[in-house]
Image (tube, rainbow, N blue to C red):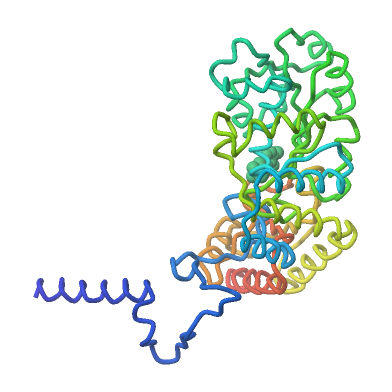
Amino acid sequence: MRESGTRRNFFTWTRNALAAAGVLSAAPGRGQSVPSHPTLASGEDYYDKLGVTKIVNAAGTYTMFTASIMPPSVQAAVASAAKHPVRLAELQKKSGEYIAKRLNCEAALVSAGAASALTLGTAACMTVGNKKAPELLPLDTAGLKNEVIVQKTHRYGYDHALKNCGIRFVEIETLEQYEAAFTDRTVMCHFFNAAEEGQISREDWIRVSHKHGVPCFNDAAADVPPISNLWKYTQMGFDLVTFSGGKGMRGPQNAGLLLGRKDLIEAAAWNNSPFDETVGRGMKVAKEQIVGMVAAVDWFLSQTDEGMQAEFRRRADRIVAQLRDIPTLTHQTFVPPVANQVPHLVIRYDQAKVRKSPLEVAEILRGGSPSIELNPSTGRKSGTAGLPSDENSIVVGVWMLEPGEDLIVGRRLREVLSKAVA
Ligand SMILES: *Cc1c(COP(=O)(O)O)cnc(C)c1O
């Protein structure tokens, strides 16, 4: 008995494994249709082949949910770039020049995301004017300037991207302390654009760093829209600014922008792939992603803030329309102040009447079909990006939904919440 059970398990396993590998696809079950050949244009669906669950992204531009979907024009640019080899140096140079022109800054570089731009920009400040210096990072920095001044409240989860260069943070709080913090080893002043606290304004940050002849960097990774932020901070005087390519701009997720002063962008390039003895060698951006980032800049500049905001509000409204009959339910659309500055739908209800907590609802939606990810602030007090969330709120990030998915999210929420009515 035991043996045959084992064998049956083995056969079942084999059959499943073969089916998963596509080997048995010539014998589909009843009612199943198997495409004879995946079309060349769309390619084989490797998520299905690998058994990876596709999700509806009602969260936002979170890296753990692969952030954004490239618009069709960007997907097409990536696909067409994949068809031809080019000279990498020429592509890096011309893409940078094109982006700089479109974004009204001196120079630009496509990095492997904003975190990579933080590393390359820091390395640039440490090595500018010294082409032999890149190979000294991160350990042999005794002969280089390596102190980065930062407001205490601007320390954050991306500190490590700067530390990769072998820098040391010098924390300050007041303007007076800022003035006094400069030494002959100060190499950069770092600003976190979406920091919720901090006494020193952007203008003062720039003024004081320039008085001491030290470049300043603004991390604005998640801070578009508004579109004009793409030139606002460089024009304000920041020497370096970064934006994530795969967040609001909907470029390739492993791309980003480093914008700013020409000499620093040039130095950032020496610290980058394809140069071997550099901190950036592992931050390779392939031709497809470089082109995709350029196409994303074009796509993003073809949008309007009003158009995007109106579309996101319509999505929120369509979801709310599905929830009209849920007792005690209230809703608001909330626009965070700096990062992710787009309408988010926040839903609340009396849990004595609707007996499922927001965290339970999130779990049910995650486990359903299609699998839906709500904003991670759902049911949590410490919301991300300034969202006003708590144990009693569901947060729907509508901006990364694909067409029609607002209805799917609305209906699933209605199903789950109406079932929970006491
Ligand atoms: C997302 C983010 C980054 C990292 O961006 P990637 O493009 O994912 O590397 C850096 N800084 C801030 C403030 C961010 O929000």
Tell me if residue 382 can be seen: no
Q: Please name whichever residue, 403 or 18, is drawn nearer the observer in this view of the structure.
A: 18
Left or right: 31 as drawn, with respect to 186: left
Query: Residue 119, relative to residue 85: is it above or below?
Result: above
**Residue 397 quadrant:** bottom right
Query: In which quadrant of the rendered image does the C terminus lie?
Result: bottom right
Q: Position of residue 28 (x, y in %)?
A: 39, 87
Tell me if residue 10 can be seen: yes
Q: Position of residue 71 (x, y in %)?
A: 72, 64
Q: Position of residue 180 (x, y in %)?
A: 79, 8
**Residue 357 quadrant:** bottom right
Q: Position of residue 355 (x, y in %)?
A: 58, 63
**Residue 325 quadrant:** bottom right
Residue sitting at 69 percent across and 66 percent down?
A: 76
* Residue that extends furthest to the bottom in the rendered view of this protein: 30
Q: Please name whichever residue, 59 or 132, is drawn nearer the observer in this view of the structure.
A: 132
Q: Please name whichever residue, 68 or 316, is drawn nearer the observer in this view of the structure.
A: 68
Residue sitting at 26 percent across and 73 percent down?
A: 14
Q: Please name whichever residue, 157 or 278, is drawn nearer the observer in this view of the structure.
A: 278
Query: Residue 104, relative to residue 199: is it above or below?
Result: below
Left or right: 371 as drawn, with respect to 125: left
**Number of numbered discs visible in the structure rendering:** 0
Answer with the quadrant where ligand 1 appears in the image.
top right
Residue sitting at 82 percent across and 31 percent down?
A: 261
Query: In which quadrant of the rendered image does the N terminus lie?
Result: bottom left
Left or right: 269 as drawn, with respect to 35: right
